[in-house]
Amino acid sequence: MINLKIRKIDAQPQEIKKLRVAAYCRVSTDSNDQKESLDTQKKHYESWIKMHSNWEFAGVFYDFGISGTKADARDGLQALLYECRIGRIDYILTKSISRFSRNTTDCLSLVRELLSYNIPIYFEKENLDTGSMESELILAILSSMAQGESESISENVKWSNQKNIENGIYKFSYLPYGYMHDKNGDMIINSDEADVIKDIFRYALNGVGTYKIAKLLQEQGVPTRRGGQWTGSTVKSILTNEKYYGAAIFNKTYTDSNFKRHKNNGESDRYYAEEHHEAIISKSEFEKVQELIQIHADERKIIKSDSKYLKRYPFSGLIICGECGSKFKRQTQSSGVAWACKTHLFHKEQCSIKFIKEEAIKAALTTVMNKLIFGYKRVLKPYLESIKLMKTDANLQRILNLKENIQKNSDRKNDIRKLRVKGLIDSTLFNQEVSRIEKQNEEYRMELRQLDNSKNDHMIKETEKLIHFIESSNTFSAFDESFLEYLDCIIVYSRTFIGFKLKCGLTLKEEICTGTK
């Protein structure tokens, strides 16, 4: 008989990991009483978390004077989500569903995302813990009630504002540059800013463009209200604002049922008031500037359509800086038309790419097209065949396998839901398994998107179009705007080296001549 020597290995005491708990607070206005309410909430949650020995305080996140209808507009909430995404929070406390989000879609989306990280939320007022919910039904109902309450409040505010406008007693909460509120909340002139407004209109009446006006103000060290940069669009908005001659147009924008703001092009009633407040410039000056702006727009062939500008020059919106990613802006110089990186124009230290001549770009694109005409059989036709080969049986089989795996996971999720309803598995295991399934399905869907034949079909179609154009063309002696039909964008790597990214997926690089030494 073998004598076995058995030695006992004592269990090591395990360190109990504390639950990292954070709280979220929000008040929708910036009044003093709301500030006190926010301070009270912050103290309440900080003390509540710290009184639990198995909890670790992970911070109180808050938004002050921000509506709860849009999650992406709340910096405090976004900071909380960031901490959750990088794994620094395990549990969240908040006062109520309406404090967390008044938008049903946002609320459910946020809860689902947090549960995918195994982070439950406790809504104090409703006594609801998303970590122990058997379904999203309760949350959906309650968040719908919160959204309905928000919509009701919004309608009441709109009605009140409408009556104040009609009665001539409405007061703007935010005033344009050049004006400020007096102690009664009335609109009065800010003398320092008003002098800048007068200068801007004077420049415009003398024929100076908006971009050059912005540059002059920047060079003169004139401060903006928020300490930012003067831009052409900022100057344009000042020159077209009726408030500077003492009038006021109300309801320039409106909010839709999804709490998104739009320019009011007649969808909602607007109101116009003459002599609403003291003017900085005369109405005749304002009207003369509008005439000059319209003449300038006609000369540049600018057409407004649904608040967006159509392309007014061949390369508008197409040229991208290869260093900083900014778009290029067209400039008229004494030596001709040039394109310059917007970042370099205002912040030379942030981007070193200098302007390039439009004629140099046209010449380079003409050279690229001529090279394709000569060599398309060695470049485009093999490229087309390689794209078609991507649509192989192996790819199709993989797509079928991925779809089958997604369906199996969906069936698995339904099975564990049934087990949860019967009480055979607890909420923690249920949430973990659902989270794992959803994560795996997202990986499958991502791979499916990469294998999606629609992208290949588009590339094949664009390549075939380009080949047809090349085969039916002779060499070009000058730039032709028909080239642009096959161009996705132009990437400027340096003043002497640019790339033409074609819609078919190819990027062709070409040297250019700057015309300078």
Image (cartoon, helix red, strand yellow):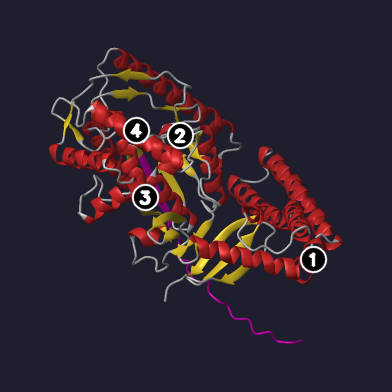
Look at label 2 and name its amino acid.
Asn
Look at the numbered discs 3 and 2 and tell me whether their residues touch, using CB distance below 8 Å: no
Residue at 45% x, 24% y: name it.
Answer: 151
Mark closer to the chain start, 1 or 4: 4
Q: Percent from the top left, x then y, of residue 471? A: 78, 60
Answer with the quarter of the image where residue 182 lies.
top left
Badge 2 is on which residue? 127
Q: Is residue 151 left or right of residue 511?
A: left
Position of the C terminus, as image quadrant, is: bottom left
Residue 110 seen in the current view = yes
Quadrant assignment for the N terminus = bottom right
Q: Nearer the viewer, mark 3 or mark 2?
A: 2
Q: Which quadrant holds residue 298?
A: top left
Q: Which residue is mark 1?
A: 381
Helix or strand or loop: what does disc 4 sit on? helix
Front residue of 76/126: it is 76
Residue 40 left/right relative to 402 = left
Label 2 or label 4, whichever comes before in sequence order: 2
Q: Nearer the viewer, residue 413 or 76?
A: 76
- The outermost residue toward the bottom is 2
